[in-house]
Image (cartoon, helix red, strand yellow):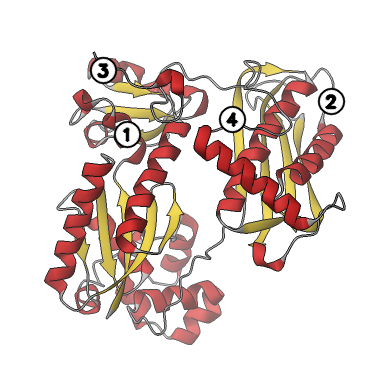
Amino acid sequence: MEYVGLADCNNFFVSCERVFRPDLWNKPVVVLSSNDGAIVARSEEVKKLGVPMGVPYFKVRDVFEKNQVAVFSSNYELYRDMSNRVMEVLAEELGEIEQYSVDESFFRMDVKDIAVAEQELFWLRETVRKQVGIPMSFGLAPTKTIAKYASEKEKRGSGVCLMTKEEWLKQADQVLLSELWGVGGAMSQKFRAQGLSSVKDLLSADPSRIERLYGVYGKKLLAEVSGDQSRSQSIHDDLPKSIMSTRGFSKTTTDFSVLAEALAYHVSKAAEELREKKGVAGKVSALILTNRHSDWVLRGGGKEAILPQATNDTRLLLKEVLRLAKEVYEPGVPYKKAGVVLGFIKPDSVGQVSLFGEDAMENERLMEAIDGLNKKIGPDSVTIGRAKLKSGWSNRHDHRSPRYTTSWNELPRVS
């Protein structure tokens, strides 16, 4: 019988830092957001201190000092490279995988013997730990939603959970809908308003009623939690609805050339991710924002445009983003943040036509060459529309660790 598996890296950002700082294993560690603003990753030791996710750093600085918490700025180049290494090991051992996020990937496994399948996952978990150094959790179940739940269930235990349909249905009355993958706070409230709190409540409901109340989403979720593979289709599309890249500045700027370089950086990152996912975007948005706590809060903003032809070409997207940004920009206004959003995403198999009148295949080969060089030499080795990061718009990273795996100048030294 074919099962769906989820491979999930535990406390991924924290684990990446610990790989190169073995003295920090089993000690409290946090990673901060862009500009060192808020907590975006916590070790189990920090969670036990009662520090919530997303809390501003300045509010818990005293707690961290008292408990000797190691603090790191976000080091996305390191995390991205470590993610690639984990995914390469998984793909080599499992065959085809479906990467869902930077630290999660779905896969399929033919299960003939439950005990044997569990041992294979334990072996895979140890293989990733030895080759990359990242601890992982594995969930294996009939559907993606149940596999996700299984992975979370054993994250603080053995790290491996194989859940059959029978086992899942036995505990359906104990599993809250709010605990399921993709059921956010608003949707959870809608379920409760109709007297639906647990998975058992949903399975006991009339399917036509669920579809009438919650549409296609409700129908697909019901199929997922039923544990019936023949009925199940993931409630999550393979392609994201949108891709966003934004970042706040360490200090405000009124200079459009600084904003333009920041936007070029974000277009490059978003377009690269879009190409990795084999997608093209039909809509693009440019954002230039002021400090929301200042007197300029009502200035700045964003503007979007529908592209004549869906594309993942960095040059075409950047040209449109800069045009939109110029329409929003006001001289003399201090801007604190910039970013881009790509929308109307669909598979790149639909084909692209260049806005420049160039051959689409030539554009595709150029983007592949740039992506290949950046992967081989290091991120941002080849850029479009910008130079290296300017201090005028780059974010704060007072606690950033070295980029051990992507920068020649920051390789770890052994003495």
Indicate which label's residue lies in the foreground, 2 or 1.
1
Q: Residues within 10 Å of mark 4 (few under 14, many from 20)?
A: some
Q: Residues within 10 Å of mark 1 (few under 14, many from 20)?
A: many
- In the rendered structure, the answer to whether residue 110 lies left or right of residue 323 reads left
Labels 3 and 2 touching (C-beta < 8 A): no
Of the numbered discs 4 and 2, the one sitting upstream in the chain is 2
Indicate which label's residue lies in the foreground, 3 or 2.
3
Q: Position of residue 67 (x, y in %)?
A: 22, 20
Q: Position of residue 264 (x, y in %)?
A: 70, 33
At label 3, the amino acid type is Val
Q: Which residue is mark 1?
A: 14
Q: Position of residue 356 (x, y in %)?
A: 86, 49
Of the numbered discs 3 and 2, the one sitting upstream in the chain is 2
Of the numbered discs 1 and 4, the one sitting upstream in the chain is 1
Residues 225 and 185: in front is 225
Q: CA distance from mark 2 to mark 1?
A: 40 Å
- In the rendered structure, the answer to whether residue 192 lies left or right of residue 28 reads right
Indicate which label's residue lies in the foreground, 1 or 3.
3
> Residue at the location (68% across, 28% down)?
262
User: Any mark on residue 414, and which?
Assistant: 3
User: Any mark on residue 246, and which?
Assistant: none
Q: Which residue is mark 2?
A: 330
> Residue at the location (26% across, 25% down)?
21
At label 2, the amino acid type is Glu
Q: Which residue is mark 4?
A: 381
Q: Which residue of the protein is positioned furthest toward the left in this rendering?
A: 115
At label 4, the amino acid type is Ser
- Where residue 179 sits, quadrant-wise, is bottom left
Q: CA distance from mark 4 to mark 2?
A: 32 Å
